[in-house]
Image (cartoon, helix red, strand yellow):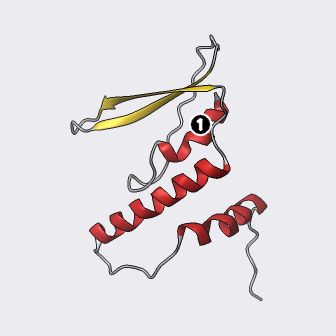
């Protein structure tokens, strides 16, 4: 007897809501990394716009951008979220586990701002 896996209701909701909007397409040939990067970048832009629309960051959060150098000399974009008027020095470091190929600082504005 084949078991149907249980899917978290929030994951199911997100999948039904987002997957049709960001679009799925036929797999690219193995080794087509430039095609994969281009497709991922296009999907990321769509996803960021969608997330900003349905869940904007709270208006009482100040957002500051800065960067730090990586070992290879490129710059790592960083963002600080702080409630207006807050004197708290508490800090949460949010690291996206995108496998170093997808995701941007902008994509997680709403999530991170809610922690502020």
Residue ID for mark 1: 112
Residue at image location 35% in from the left, 30% down from the top = 67
The residue located at (58%, 14%) in the rendering is: 89
Whole-percent x, y for residue 59 in the image: 65, 31
Image quadrant in which you'd find residue 60 = top right
Q: Residue furthest top?
A: 87
Decide if residue 97 is on the left or right side of residue 72: right
Q: Is residue 86 above or below residue 95?
A: above
Number of numbered discs on residues: 1
**Rendered location of residue 32, percent (x, y):** 29, 74
112 vs 90: above or below: below
Whether residue 93 sits left or right of residue 88 in the image: it is: left
Q: Residue at (61%, 34%) from the top-left corner?
A: 113
- Tell me where residue 33 appears, x and y as whole percent: 29, 68
Q: Residue furthest bottom?
A: 1
Q: Residue furthest left?
A: 73
In the shown orientation, is residue 65 left or right of residue 110?
Answer: left
């Amino acid at each position: 007897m084949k078991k149907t896996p249980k899917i978290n209701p929030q994951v199911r909701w997100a999948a039904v809501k987002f997957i049709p909007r960001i679009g799925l397409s036929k797999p690219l040939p193995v080794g087509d990394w430039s095609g994969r990067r281009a497709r991922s970048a296009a999907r990321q832009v769509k996803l960021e716009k969608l997330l900003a629309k349905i869940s904007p960051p709270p208006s009482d959060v100040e957002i500051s951008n800065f960067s730090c150098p990586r070992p290879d000399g490129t710059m790592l974009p960083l963002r600080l979220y702080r409630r207006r008027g807050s004197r708290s020095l508490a800090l949460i470091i949010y690291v996206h586990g995108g496998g170093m190929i997808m995701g941007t600082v902008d994509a997680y504005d709403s999530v991170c701002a809610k922690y502020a």
